Amino acid sequence: MDRATEHAEYEERPGRSETGGREATGRTGTDDGTALELLVHGVGGTTPERMLDDPRTVRVTGDDTAAVFRRIDDADAETRPADRRGGPVPEAYVWCNLTSGNGSRALWLLLLPFMVVNLAHWMRPATRHRRRTIRLHGLLVRLTGLTLTVLLVAAACEVALDLTAWQCAGTRACAEAHTWLGFLSPDLSRHGWWSSPGRRLALAAVVPAALTVLLWYLSHRTWSEYESQRPMDRAEVRPTEDDVEPVALGRPGFWYGRRLVARLRAAHTAAGFLTVAAAVGTSAAREDRRPGGPAVLELLGWLFNATLVVLAVVVVWVVCRRGRSERRLDRELDGHLVRGLPTASIAVLVLALVYAGWSRPGWSSAGRLPGDLTFGGITLVQGLLVLALGVVARVLHRSRPDPRTALYGLGGPAVAMLSCALGGVMSAGVAQRVADWLGGTEDALPGPPILLTWQAAVIPPLLMVVVTLLVWLARRTWVLRREETAAVEEEYGLAAAVRPRVSGPDEEPEPRDAARTLRIARTRAMAALTDRAPRVVGIISTVTLLLGAGALAGAFATGETPARAAQDSYAFVAGAAQTAQALGSWLIGVGFLLFVTWGRRAYKDASARRTIGILWDVGTFWPRAAHPFAPPCYAERAVPDLTWRMATWTRTTGGRLVISGHSQGSVLAAAAAWQLTPSVRSRVALLTYGSPLERLYGRWFPAHFGPASLASLHREVDCWRNLYRLTDPIGGPVRLPGRCGPEVDAEPFKDPLAYGRTAGHPLPAPILGHSDYQADPAFAAERQRLLARIGPGVPGPRDC
């Protein structure tokens, strides 16, 4: 079916009028008022001048972070409705500064594990009548996030306390090589005041404590800048017959998680300080339990450990006690908890520093601090939490299965496993690099905990699996390219003739170009790889879980590094273990540096940002529900902005409104439409293009963008049209069931517009993919039909 035929059938469907888009119940075919078209850009951002196609623009509302712009000529369009008959007033909502800025924001990539585990919270499968199971799902993800905070602070303790203050400063050769540690060395300082092991640990504790303060500060400041915008006041959503509402994004408090974020921030901050206190105080307490030690200090050590346990239980209780309050706009704040818990943890940390700094004659640093037990316990708990999360997610998915859901509902556990792996790799990478710098790979120092070395050694096998997946994807792309080649020849009329069919009476196309056909087919095949992302993520997560379990078992079973544990085995095994250990340590260090460098370039280079922008914008779209130290949620600013603009404009003017979103902008547009009251939502039309609403969000976040939610949005807005291309790796069809599907999804746009050189295209038409949808004449036709279908009257019911 060609596009013209589809459009004709589309306009003739039952229940549609030529101008109203619904049954013409009390509606008129003309509108004397002003219409508004609100444009929302996508990943990477753009300028208002380019969005509005006019170099003269003016900001009508907003600030330097996010704002709405108009052409200067349209600044007072509401006072001149007669001038706009036949066309809406275009407005551009520019929100790119919410996710981009100066190069310092590349440091947010260091918070990537926190962002990824926060994503796992929102990947819950769609279900009903499972309220307790849903709460358990959120609880397990929050506990996994808590372990990541402890892991990050423990890694900082490993570097500052164990490797630097305990091992290097306590070894004469290492202290001589790093003269800045001379005042901490008993040999070089002649047993100076700071040379006592406890005082060295107390001084080094400043580093992980400062890291905890930095995380708290970033979380608090970014919340004030990005997430403090309160949504519009609405009536409280009352429970219905179902335990779970079909559209959670429409709840009044969905985009205002102040109370939960404040509670989690207090709990995670306290966990960070308690981790530092445990690293300092337990070492001194272990020394005091030796035979012949002072009884008073031994008693203080037991009291200190008991206090740590009590506060740790309180932190876990706070994380478990309360989830998100979405059914109402929760303005309350647990002030005593938010202030008291971090204060108590700081007090315990100060007591730990004083206790460890007490004089203990004869105490010397030897070996390692008990880091193997710490990191091993964190790894074991993370594995158990991920397995439990997988069981819960599977139960939820089986209660309401959807074949389009990624990994059959196991997307959340898979992503949570990846977040734990990222945290482990970053921790091991920093520890290995610092150990190499200080000399920890030589016999002079014991080096980092054995488990971290084992975790580094499993990186090469994991990369082999990744390379195998890339080979499989390349082969799959080659097969798809062959299939798409035939489809391209048929679409452009090349199958039965040597020369393509003429597009118009005055056009003379070039002969068939094999390279051109191959390029178009390859672009389509590569765009289709997005749909295979769930399988790749699932395999990598499973292999990561198995390799992590093997590293944990190997570390505790042998008590040696992989190279030393295998040195008495077969030559091939010993060589492989030594190679994996050395290569893994090097890969972690280089990968960590490349990661930060790439992140900085992504924020300064627009082309690099578009490469990874969709993944980053998906991650920071969701509120911080599982981890308060994740990068800020820009949607908690953007969605209220769009909601306020649409609601106030329709209430003030009573006119029509079209919200037009490209890529990630279409997701913001849908989220804002759900936040409108039903009366306002019914006067809004939705135009989406290059939209990941179903292809990414619907598959990975089925509880919020699943078929039921998207179908509900289609029923409640005035009308909706979705445009996409087969060459687009991000956008795709909405795939609503039944007659609603073709009603929303247009036929795929042809890309490129022309196969060869023609009178209309004397130069080869580019393959646009995800960009420049407005360059296609079909876009203007679809937009005009959408504008013609909306009207000022109260809409009547429709079949779908």
Image (cartoon, rainbow, N blue to C red):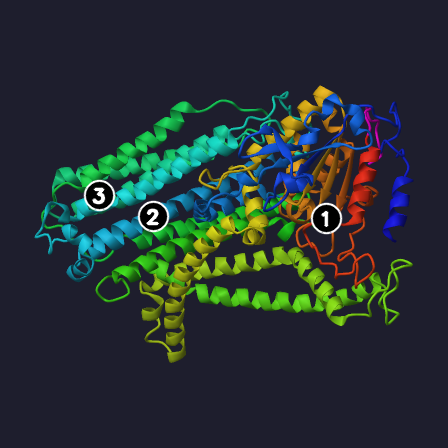
Q: In this view, does 167 lie above or below 97?
A: below
Marks 3 and 1 sit apart, C-alpha to C-alpha, by 60 Å
Residue numbers of the magenta segment: 791-800
The tag earlier along the polypeptide, 1 or 2, is: 2
Q: How crowded is mark 1: few (under 14 residues within 10 Å), some or many (20 or more)?
A: many
Percent position of residue 401, x then y: 69, 46
Looking at the rendering, which quadrant does residue 448 occupy? bottom left
- The amino acid type found where label 2 is placed reads Ala
Task: State left or right for residue 182 relative to residue 475.
Answer: left
State whether residue 77 is above or below residue 206. Answer: above
Of badges 3 and 1, nearer the viewer stands: 1
Residue 111 got which mark? none
Q: Which of disc 3 and disc 2 is earlier in sequence?
A: 2
The residue beneath circle 2 is 154
- Cβ atoms under marks 1 and 2 closer than 8 Å: no
Asked if 258 appears above or below 548 in the picture, the reply is: above
Residue 793: in magenta span: yes
Q: What element carries label 3?
A: helix
Nearest the viewer among 704 and 622 is 622
Q: Which of 117 and 108 is in front in this view?
A: 108
Q: Residues within 10 Å of mark 3 (few under 14, many from 20)?
A: many
Q: Is 464 within the magenta?
A: no
- The dominant secondary structure in magenta is loop
Q: Mark 1 points at which residue?
A: 773
Under mark 1, the amino acid is Tyr
| Structural crowding at the residue carrying mark 2, measured as other residues with C-alpha within 10 Å and reported as few (<14), some (14–19) or many (≥20) | many
Q: Can residue 249 be seen in this view?
A: no
Q: Indicate the amino acid at tag 3.
A: Ala
Distance (Cα) linking label 2 and label 3: 15 Å
Where disc 1 sits, the SS reads helix
Residue wearing tag 3: 202
The residue positioned farthest toward the left in the image shown: 190
